[in-house]
Amino acid sequence: MQNILYPVDSKPPFGLTLLLAAQHLLAALGGIIAVPLVLGAVLKLPTEDTIVLVNAALLISGVVTIIQCQGVGPIGLRLPSVMGTSFTFVAAAIAIGFEHGVAGILGSSLVGSLVMIIGSFFMPYVRKLFPPIVTGVVVMMIGLSLVPVAVDWFAGGQRGDAHYADPANLAMATFVLIVVVGLVQWGKGIFSAAAIVIGIMVGYVVALALGWINFDSVKNADIVAVPQPLHFGLSFPIAGIIGMSIAYLVTIVESSGNFLALGNATQTEITGKHLRGGVLCDGLGSALAAIMSTTPFSSFSQNIGVISLTGVASRYVVTVMGVLLVLAGIFPVFGALIVSIPMPVLGGAGLMMFAMIIAAGIQMLDKVERSKRNGLIIAISIGCGLAVTTRPELLDKLPSFVKEIFGSGITVGSLLALILNLVLPNDKEETKVEH
């Protein structure tokens, strides 16, 4: 794993901090705006309503990220955790939206957030359920679940797109990957710490020279956007509240896993107090998101890869990234410029970032005692988690609430590791396999 260049409480020089914050922004921005864009498209919302969802997502992501990093009383993880809109809620949101509109989605989200807020106070007990073998599986599943996302970026879109995996896309992504690897391995100082953003900038310049960049979104973006609380109103359908509450329970598991992975990446021991503050911030942030007219939040695992790859663990850097997100919400033209980056350019860096999370999980599991019992836990958890990740259609014929709970490979792998660790007998006399 990369050595820590800037520890959690360090403050790099301001110019470098801005560059490093931009690096995190590039990793997160696509994910933050993807959820409101998907909802807008599926629910056939007017363009101006989709823009409200997007701008609010950016703005509130920034605010909640700042609170998560710096902490306010008992609220916040106080580690470099990036917060953003979560895909865990998309299936429930679409189902609610078709029947009750965006007001139903946001009202259900507001009430459902109580599950996370109340659940946060039980996190010190939950922490005891995550010994190293469970944590290692969770970290590996986070990385493995993200790799298909990076592969699609690498190939330049989604499977089925006309230009998916065009040789030109693969060549561009490979070029960026080589630049990033070269900077991480041989770069010194800023060139190593900012390897991802420098690699993306180099790729962007090459893409610009090749005529790949489309500036239409920049030209059409508003210069300033004012946040609009309760723009869609709120309604509270019972079925919607139940669906959202289930999604929040799943998010508690995923966020806990992300916080534990973040602890590994930043070389910080994660305690029950950390988890309580992090999950509480997540729940309160989602409640704020509902009031400010956007969808619920969770921590972003993509940015753990940035920390693992570059060794920049400063929460000050991610706090500044939160400020940039707030600016992107107020000045949409800023976010539109970031969105103009071609997917293969992001894919070259993304594949490396997410693979680094897998490597971190392998290193954690390497320290776990080798026994038949532990081997079973690792194999079954990762195998079933990957089954859902690589073939999500596996759950298509099951009831919708089953798909809601087990649609994420991270959730499946985490829950199986946790349950198997509790139920499989831990025989101390068991013959151990030698290293």
Image: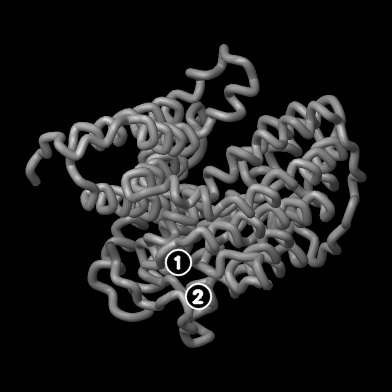
Report which residue position mark 2 lands on: 19
Q: Position of residue 378 (x, y in %)?
A: 30, 36
**Amino acid type at mark 2:** Leu
Quadrant assignment for the N terminus: bottom left
The residue lying furthest to the top in this view is 397
Q: Is residue 230 above or below residue 425?
A: below
The residue depicted at 32 percent of the width and 30 percent of the height is 424
Total labels drawn = 2
Identify residue type, mark 1: Val
Q: Residue at x 78, y 56 (%)?
A: 288
Residue 64 percent location from the top left of the image: 67, 63
Give the residue at x 81% y 43%: 106
CA–CA distance in space, label 2 to label 1? 7 Å
Residue 411 screen position, x and y as percent: 49, 36
Query: 163 or 416, which lies in front?
Result: 416
- In the figure, is residue 156 to the left or right of 175? right
Q: Which residue is mark 1?
A: 197
Q: Position of residue 111 (x, y in %)?
A: 80, 43
> Dots 2 and 1: beta carbons under 8 Å?
yes
